[in-house]
Image (spheres, grey):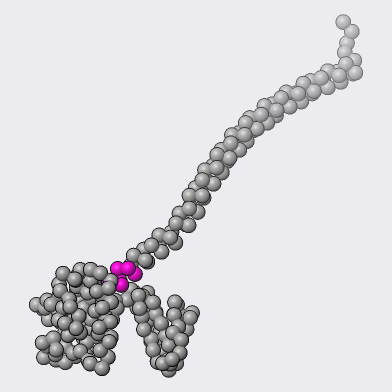
Amino acid sequence: MPPKTRTDSTASDIDATMKEILQQLKRINNRIEIIEEKVDSIESSLNYHTEQWKEVKEDMDQIKNTIPALKGKMEEHEIEKANKMAEIQGVPHHQDESLKDIVTKVAELNDVHLTPVNIDMVYRNKSKKSIIVKFIQTHICQDFIRSFKAKKNKSLTSKELGYKTASKIYINEYLLYPTRQLFHKVREYKKENNFKFAWTINQKVFLRETEGSKAIHIKSLSDL
């Protein structure tokens, strides 16, 4: 057999190199296929989670839209409840007092026929300075408050209830905390700016500058 020439050796080396390159390409292609499979899997997972996220977001949006309506219903319920309530100030606190008897006596002195049956519940506030009474119906509460307001020139005192002291008694509608805070600020504004009237009705706050001027409904401090 004749010896290999330089050309034969070079061709053989090239074949070996090409074979190695082809093997490397095959391995690379295999890796690419594996990577593509993983990418497809990730893409499917992402699509799934994207759909899941869309559903979650839709649920969250529905909940967010529901919250204001629920808050509105809660506020309506609180206002409806508060409109049956009155606050009596100026009655001295005694350990063995009967609050229902006190309320019915106050009503009698204001020419309002009232029995304990008309009272849903009655209690002293935390400071014991005020008596909070909730009536079974709104119109009973309104009559109770209105009758007192109608007798502006006739002051009612604790002495008329049988107490030794003669502290002046006030009757107002019971105010929910936000209304109470707003009304406090409105009264300060009234005093500082020489307005003549500030009052509340059904948890709404009003301000009037003079006797014949228009009543202003104050919804928030930004209205002042």
Q: x, y (%) of residue 14? A: 83, 22
Q: Is residue 196 left or right of residue 148?
A: right
Residue drawn at point x = 43 percent, y = 88 percent: 208
Nearer the observer, 91 or 16: 91
Q: Quadrant of the N terminus?
A: top right
Magenta span includes 80: yes
Query: Which stretch did the figure color magenta?
Result: 79-84
Q: Is residue 109 visible?
A: yes
Pick the residue in front: 51 or 200. Answer: 200
Q: Is residue 215 above or below residue 41?
A: below
Q: Is the residue 79 above or below the residue 2 in the image?
A: below
Quadrant assignment, res 133? bottom left
Q: Is residue 127 visible?
A: no
Q: Residue at x 35, y 75 (%)?
A: 202
Q: Nearer the viewer, residue 104 or 180?
A: 104
Residue 137 image position (x, y, % from top left): 25, 69
Residue 17 vs residue 148: left or right? right
Q: Is residue 135 above or below residue 13?
A: below
- Give the residue furthest to the left: 96
Locate residue 193: give its quadrant.
bottom left
Q: On the rendered structure, is 20 left or right of 129?
A: right
x 34%, y 65%: residue: 77
Query: How many numbered marks have been drawn onto this rendered protein structure?
Result: 0
150 part of magenta stretch: no
